[in-house]
Amino acid sequence: MSFLSIQNLHKSYGATPIFSDIDCEIGQGEFVTLLGPSGCGKSTLLRCIAGLTGVNGGRILLGGQDLVPLAPQKRGIGMVFQSYALFPNMTVQQNVAFGLRMQQVGKAESAQRVGEALAMVELGDFAARYPHQLSGGQCQRVALARSLVTRPRLLLLDEPLSALDARIRKHLREQIRAIQQELGLTTIFVTHDQEEALVLSDRIFLMNAGKIVQSGNAETLYTAPVDAFAAGFIGNYNLLDAEAASRLLGRPIGGRIAIRPESIRLGGQGGIEAQIRSHSLLGNVIRYRVEARGVELLVDVLNRSAADMHASGQRIVLNIEANAIREVA
């Protein structure tokens, strides 16, 4: 039985639909990511679950209880925003304790729970500081502690890492995942960053234009996209129409296909003659732009040695295995 059940949920602003017919089930302790481009409805869906935005129809069941009629503070949900939303005139300790004060938790228990929450996010030594004395990453950890301290039934994270630099983002997402697993806390995470979704999630709900177009674990979404949108959004698939695919592969292809750039091999016997157009160094990967039979492709190769790098204009051979070619709608 699912812990969170969203049934036939609708939301629109006037005549403008945001999403419709949203149906999904989330198990207790699951980490689920809502992934999709800006404007697809993922943040609005999160706000509807939290009760910050009303719905036009449908049900949101948490542990069998319908949340739609309940006020936000009655739902037992913690939410972390992109903007931190900390009170600037309160210390870290006071910010974290604010929710407990609203719940009228006693001072002794409140102090203990605040201390535990700050220790969990590694900010125990910062309790007396104010938000302006903290870095962006530290402020986001305070916001996370403030949500955890109330012991929510469900944790919602609305793009909490998007304003942080890459190094801090990586550290904080690892910290969020570790805390979520330690507490067994059912969590919904919103992002448009595919890497975050692939690394963090038990399951991913890929959204587009107010619909969930595909759901599954990271491996399923990456290796088996259901359509051209999914293939284009997850990873860097080469998407070819039937005419270009037939020309490239030298045989009739009936529809659009997707080929992952890392599944194309450079060199070897036989294969398809091609020419390097350019290359980009992406750290441990070299991404080549190649042309073969009038078709442009991206090819990703591990950066083992600078001596192995192919120069622009160089003629090479491509080998594409049959199981690397996926038909997409």
Image (spheres, helix red, strand yellow):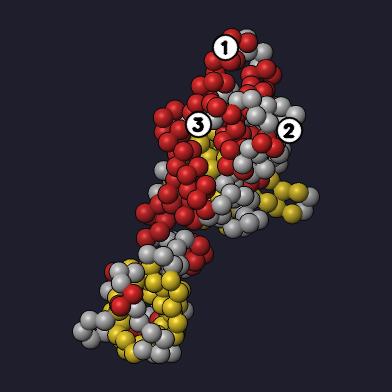
Identified by mark 3, the residue type is Glu
Which mark sits nearer the N-terminus, 2 or 1? 2
Residue 129 in the image: above or below residue 259: above
Number of residues whose C-alpha sits closer than 10 Å to that of mark 3, classed few (under 14), some (14–19) or many (20 or more): some
Residue position for label 1:
109
Q: How many marks?
A: 3
> Where does the image place residue 18, in percent across and percent down from the top left?
68, 51
Residue 55 in the image: above or below residue 210: above
Is there any visible trace of residue 283 in the rendered image?
yes
> Where does the image place residue 52, in percent across and percent down from the top left?
70, 36
Spatial CA distance of label 3 from label 2 is 20 Å
Which mark sits nearer the N-terminus, 1 or 3? 1
At 57% from the left and 21% from the top, the residue drawn is 114
**Disc on res. 122:** 3
Left or right of residue 23, residue 16 in this image: right
Spatial CA distance of label 1 from label 3 is 20 Å
Residue position for label 2:
88
Element type where label 3 sits in the image = loop
Q: Which of 185 and 87 is in front in this view?
A: 87
At 61% from the left and 41% from the top, the residue drawn is 135
Which mark sits nearer the N-terminus, 3 or 2? 2
Identified by mark 1, the residue type is Glu
Q: Which of 130 and 7 is in front in this view?
A: 130
